[in-house]
Image: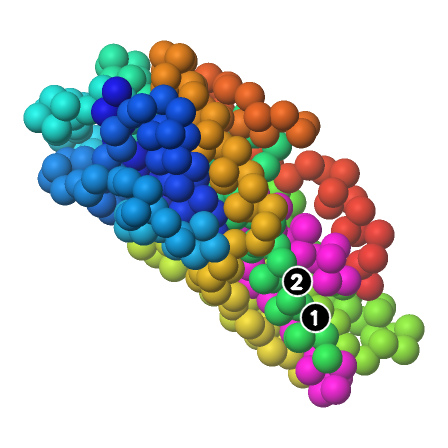
Amino acid sequence: MRIGLLTGGGDCPGLNAVIRAVVRKGINVHGHELVGFRNGWAGVLSGESVDLTHQSTSGILHRGGTILGTSRTNPYKGDEDGGAKVRATLESQGIDALIPIGGEDTLGVAKRLSEEGVPVVGVPKTIDNDLAGTDFTFGFQTAVQIATDAIDRLHTTAESHNRVIVVEVMGRHAGWIAAYSGIAGGADVVLVPERPFDVEEVCERIRRRHASGRTFSIVVVAEGAQAKDGDVSGDAGQTDAFGHVRLGGIAVELEREIEARTGFESRMTILGHVQRGGTPLAYDRVLGTRFGVAAVDAVTDGRFGMMTALRGTAIELVPLDEALAEPKLLDPSLFETAEVFFG
Ligand code: F6P
């Protein structure tokens, strides 16, 4: 078979591990040919592709980002007949099946193409860990480690200066990174999209903590968190090709509010894309590798319309429908664990 690969949406540590695994197993065991489309769905629409071989995928396992490039291009944006354009490229390049590696948007396109008869097997990717159907997405553990390292560093400077430091982490719909890094880093308050917060309550927790003798506090906030009254949010007022609002900046508002209401000197840090860059942890390389192997096996077996998934410790296939029905929100018990340590 001749199989097309693409990486779409925000990049994520571990993407290259998936590409390498698909290519190695695809060529060595199944005798397939592999083709990589450049820059997500943009490359499929324009037909820009490269042959993926042992040579072109060697030495990439430990590298962050994606050797194929990525984009947030949506083939179905507006009135475009994205399906027809994608099918035309697949036909002209003799592609028998596609393996899109992406999050809700990229796999949403994959699902629609699958419904239109295009043979696809998806691989779930996002540092946010908010895709249903899989216990974890690769990239998440690396992002959590980066955020935890940052919180550790912010702790020592917050303590030295007797300050409140607000750390903003990624997490559009779900507070997985905030909760994990908040627990691992010993945060005094964690704010997540699933639980709209009251600014005054946050301030009260900090006041209580400081009244009991502590002189600094760390607040971890997910970019998608919002105040109950809607006054404090990270909506930057722009949308992407999938209609998602660009987030970022809730920490700026929180820093201001906390300092104004409590009188404690406050600072904020937005970790942003630092969380997506750099070398993947071993966990994400292994998960990406297992997903890649499973995806190319699934294509070989004709299991189309499916997505690779981690269930417990096993790699399984789940229907794309199931995975995309709704985002996987934070497990409430995890938030409750973080809450035990709030100020
Ligand atoms: O991939 C998901 C994500 O990391 C979100 O948490 C964040 O809102 C978004 O990507 C930012 O993406 P961009 O690279 O377009 O700024």
Say whether residue 58 is visible: yes
Which quarter of the picture shows residue 90? Answer: top left
Q: Label 2: which residue? A: 148
For the point 35% across and 56% down, the residue is 237
Whether residue 53 appears in magenta in the rendering, the answer is: no
Residue that sits furthest to the right in the current view: 212
Residue 223 visible, this angle: no
In the rendered view, does 225 fall on the left or right side of 6? right
Q: Residue at x 49, y 32 (%)?
A: 291
Q: Secondary structure at mark 1?
A: helix
Is residue 115 shown above or below 284?
A: above
Using a 10 Å C-alpha cutoff, classify the residue at mark 1 as few (fewer than 14 neighbours), some (14 to 19) or many (20 or more). Answer: some
Q: Circles 1 and 2: CB distance less than 8 Å? A: yes
**Which of these two is toward me, 149 or 36?**
36
| Residue 334, label in figure | none
Quadrant for the N terminus in the image: top left
The crowding category of the residue bearing disc 2, from other C-alpha atoms within 10 Å (few below 14, some 14 to 19, many at least 20), is: many
- The three-letter amino acid code for the residue at tag 2 is Thr
Q: Which residue is mark 1?
A: 152
Determine the residue positioned at 29% across, 25% down. Answer: 32
Segment colored magenta? 157-186
Tag 2's secondary structure?
Answer: helix
Relative side of 278 to 194, left or right: left
Residue 126 locus on image (x, y percent): 47, 43
Q: How many marks?
A: 2
Q: Is residue 334 left or right of residue 253?
A: right
163 up-or-down from 16: above or below: below
Residue in the picture at 80% in, 47% down: 337
Residue 98 placement (x, y as % from top left): 29, 26
Q: Quadrant of residue 112?
A: top left
